[in-house]
Amino acid sequence: MPKTLETFLFRTTGGLMSRVRVQFYRGLGMQIGERCRLEKIRVRRPSQIRMGAHNALSEGTWLWPLDADYTGTRIEIGNGNYFNRNVMIDSCGFVKIGNHTMFGPGVYITDSNHTIDPTKWIAECPMDVGRVVIGDGCWLGSNVTILKDVTLGARCIVAAGAVVTRSFSHGSLIGGNPGRLIKRGDIELPA
């Protein structure tokens, strides 16, 4: 296939559809910075989502705030982040993503847990709501799960398949289920 046809079919049309999606979600109240790329993603309650500039969200990404009226922000995404395929951010409280972080395929982030009451069905029980904060320059490998009330400092690396149930300071290498500290590095942030 000639290079110009390949460019047109795969890059130009994809870029055009991304721009259409950005305008569509902006029209529904989602705050989106400049030069963001949105592939085929799913969004609920777009007015509860704020996203900075230069983010790329691959196909299958879900931005999923609680399906209830709310005037604030439940999902806040900084600048220059990359979300690989099938990343889900599930927020009943507040999830904050810093800048320049990379998410592998299948990452799941939630800021809440189901509660259990033996006199009720699980769907009737209230959620135990918290928050999640992912610092600048982190890298979350494929199929990582980040649970309620976790804060990751800047430049953390989370190994593929890890389930992170507690907070870690900057420069931590985290792996396992439950996630534990493998190594801490003295990592400087670029200027």
Image (cartoon, helix red, strand yellow):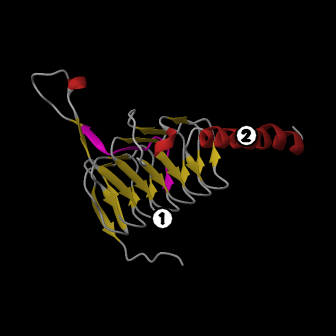
Q: Is residue 16 left or right of residue 102?
A: right
Q: Which mark is residue 91?
A: none
Q: Residues within 10 Å of mark 1 (few under 14, many from 20)?
A: many
Amino acid type, residue under disc 1 in the picture: Gly
Amino acid type, residue under disc 2 in the picture: Gly
The residue under the point 43% across, 49% down is 73
The residue under the point 40% across, 47% down is 74
Residue nearest the observer in this picture, 31 or 88 = 31
Give the x, y percent position of residue 65: 41, 39
Whole-angstrom CA distance, mark 2 to mark 1, is: 27 Å
Provide the residue designation for mark 1: 137
Magenta-colored span: 102-113
Provide the residue designation for mark 2: 14
The residue under the point 41% across, 55% down is 96
| For residue 86, above or below residue 141 | above
Residue nearest the observer in this picture, 67 or 111 = 67
Q: Is residue 78 left or right of residue 122?
A: right
Numbered disc total: 2
Q: Is residue 65 left or right of residue 113?
A: right
Please state, as top left, top right, bottom left or bottom right, where the N terminus lies in the image: top right
